[in-house]
Image (tube, rainbow, N blue to C red):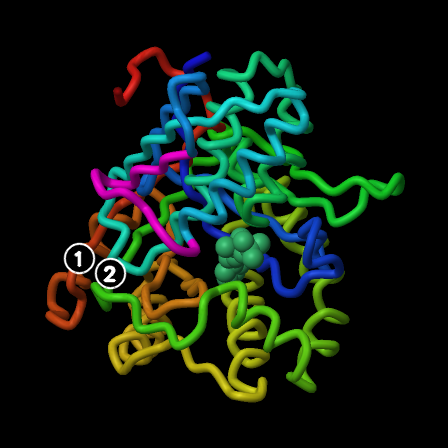
Amino acid sequence: MKATALAHSNTALIKYLGKKDEQLIIPMNNSISITIDALSTITTVEFSPQYTEDVFILNDKKATGQAYQRVVKHLDLLRQEAQRKLKAKVVSKNNFPTAMGLASSASGFAALTVAACAALGLKKTPQELSMLSRQGSGSSCRSIFGGFVEWVKDDGTGKSYAIQLADEDWWDLRDIVLILEEKEQRQYSTREAMRLSMKTSPFFAARLAATESNLDKMRRAIKKRDFTLLGTVAEHDCLLMHAVALTSNPWQLFWTSATVKMMKLVPQLREKGLPCYFTIDSGANMHLLTLPEHQESILAELEKHHFIKKIVCARLAGGATIISDHLF
Ligand code: 2P0
């Protein structure tokens, strides 16, 4: 009853913002992401009578508190599916320091779901895995699939899961991940920040109303491989999300001065003939989207700016998979 899975993180082009159901993690709007190889998680799960309690070791450290409780809650859900009561040992490693402030819950919960289901002998389709993973952390349901992915809020029968719009070979997009701050600077957890945004910002409804049209544009951009449309819409939706966060009560600003400097630089790069667009999640770091033929020139420009602490070049990745090398 032991299995290991590899899952990649994803970058939202149309953001997930607000929950219709906080317990089941049903989102207020569909979201679209790309699964990227920059940050991945490998997780080994073993269920055994030898364990008297669940143990979760993340990046060589025994997890406690909220991080531990979220994993136990997810294991409980999967145990219930399998009608088993055995406790588990979970060992998980990110290929990228967690302290860098980049979301790791997406790759983390996708890897945990796939590994634990396999260890429990649960035969699940990717769609079913996506529904289970969603209940651990919303955005993780998109990391079950590779390439271009849409998380459907409700398929018409009340089910919410991700679907693949196009695989990782459809279009060689590049995501240059710019580490601008190496430490988490958040006042609230992503979950709490999202709740505050939805409950208190007068702009939440306006952003939601704009989302259907932006989703349509994004699907069209992917289908036609229209980079200008994809980038313009991703940048706009990112700014809508941050406008909602800024106007919530208490207000939330995720950017630092380095983020703002970088935001101002992006249109200048475009003016120099280097097509690139930014998106930012609930943190200070930035994803710079571009095409392979412009990547080197963009990197040469970025090198001139010493406020950028680290650069990680990502390509599109495949979905979450079982691998044979266990972590213990
Ligand atoms: C996204 N984010 O679409 C958005 C954009 C952050 C900004 O999904 O509460 O960690 O576990 O469902 O998945 C991060 O939220 O939240 C996120 P929960 P999650 O990627």
**In this view of the protein, which residue sits in the foreground, 171 or 120?**
120
Q: Which residue is mark 2?
A: 179
Give, as a single range, the part of the protein colored magenta: 54-66
Q: Which residue is mark 1?
A: 310
**Label 2 vs 1, first from the N-terminus:** 2
Between marks 2 and 1, how big is the CA–CA gap?
Answer: 5 Å
The residue positioned farthest toward the right in the image shown? 157
Relative to 274, 229 lies left or right = right
Image marks 2 and 1: residues in contact by CB distance under 8 Å: yes
Q: Amino acid at mark 1?
A: Lys
Q: Position of residue 185 (x, y in %)?
A: 31, 73
**Residue 195, placed above or below residue 244:** above
- Asked whether the viewer can see residue 145, the reply is yes
How many residues crowd around disc 1 within 10 Å: few (fewer than 14), some, or many (20 or more)? some
The picture quadrant where one finds residue 7 is: top left
Residue 58 among magenta residues: yes
Q: Position of residue 274 (x, y in %)?
A: 32, 59
**In this view of the protein, which residue sits in the foreground, 254 or 111?**
111
The residue under the point 30% across, 52% down is 176
The residue under the point 41% across, 24% down is 45
The kind of secondary structure element at disc 1 is strand
Q: Amino acid at mark 2?
A: Ile
Give the quadrant of the C terminus: top left
The residue under the point 34% across, 11% down is 324
The residue under the point 88% across, 42% down is 156
The kind of secondary structure element at disc 2 is strand
